[in-house]
Amino acid sequence: MEKLKERIEECKKKLPKDAQQLVEDGYLDLCSKYPFNRYTNIFSVLLKKGDLSYDEYERIRDGYFKRNPNLDLFEMSPRSFGQTWGEEWLTKQNIGLIKSTNNQYDLWLPLQNNDGIKIEVKSSRVIALDDKRPPVEKAHKKPKGTPEEIASAIYNLPFKMNFQQLKPSCCDVFIWMAVWLDEIDIWVIPSSKIKIRDQNTPKRKRNESIVSDDGILYMGSQHQGGKGGKTPEGQIFVTNHHYKDLGRYKATLDNLIDKIEKYGNSN
């Protein structure tokens, strides 16, 4: 976004004086309504009244899309993103995961020696803590650098993700995915490691790890399932301060199947 804004500012400075007011913040706040957002209006003025050619506009647009390949995922409705995107994306990777026909879990990994491994997929977008803007405008790119630099930058990048409707009794493993503008982080977590916090388990203090020493993640209750029902159901919030806690469960597409087999057979 920074590169895009810099290029737009360069073009705006070259506008005739009578067109300057059309790209001022005050005017844009008044005329920018879905689907005619502020950038649509700015580019319309630059193309018509500035010296921005359509070829240059295409280069700016395509460069932005290339730098932010997951942009469209931040424009999806929360329902579509949360319920269908994750499992569809994983099955398209052609690594052996099959869409389940059972409503209790999302994916299935067939194995030769047993019935296979049941998988539940949960995804969350990494966005800034700002209720006034839509997700696409507050989406984060993943910091770059050494592992230490990345960990430090993420720790200082305020966000909150919510992995919800977790039903450990319905699957063998969970696949969690965090979607950045330019990357996707993946974790594989044994369902046995996710539990409802009971009255005897101390609540986590502020900024403490969300993962216990033995790898347990305690979820808060959600809906009636978390209140002693036959199918316990809960949710877990992950903030920038807790992102590193999930490191022990980190996976990549290259080792995802190995992780699923390892943790799926350990329950």
Image: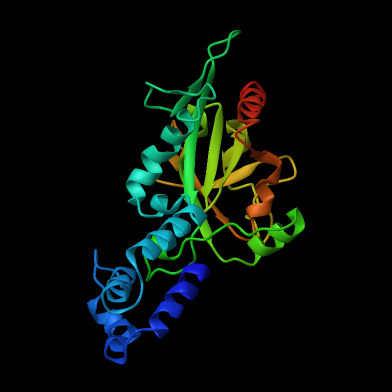
Question: At 64% from the left edge and 48% from the top edge, which residue is drawn?
Answer: 201
Q: What colour-coding does the image apply? A: rainbow
Query: In front: 55, or 266?
Result: 55
Give coordinates of residue 248: x percent, y percent: 71, 41
Quadrant of residue 12 within the rendered picture: bottom left
Which residue is depicted at the point 52% across and 59% down?
160
Which residue, as the protein is rendered here, is positioned at the far bottom?
17
Q: How many marks?
A: 0
222 to 158, vertically: above or below: above
Q: Which residue is more in the foreground, 183 or 56?
A: 56
Q: Which image quadrant: the C terminus?
A: top right
Taking depth in this image into account, of 150 and 54 the one nearest to the observer is 54
Image quadrant assignment for residue 194: top right
**Does the image show residue 181?**
no
Residue at 63 percent across and 22 percent down: it is 261
Q: Where is residue 202 in the image (x, y as percent from the top left)?
A: 65, 52
Query: Where on the picture, by quarter, is residue 254?
Result: top right
| Rendered position, 221 above or below 115 | below
Q: Which percent across, then down, holds residue 120? A: 48, 32
Side of 119 relative to 12 (left or right)? right
Indicate whether 163 appears above or below 175: below
Residue 1 percent across, percent down from the top left? 49, 66
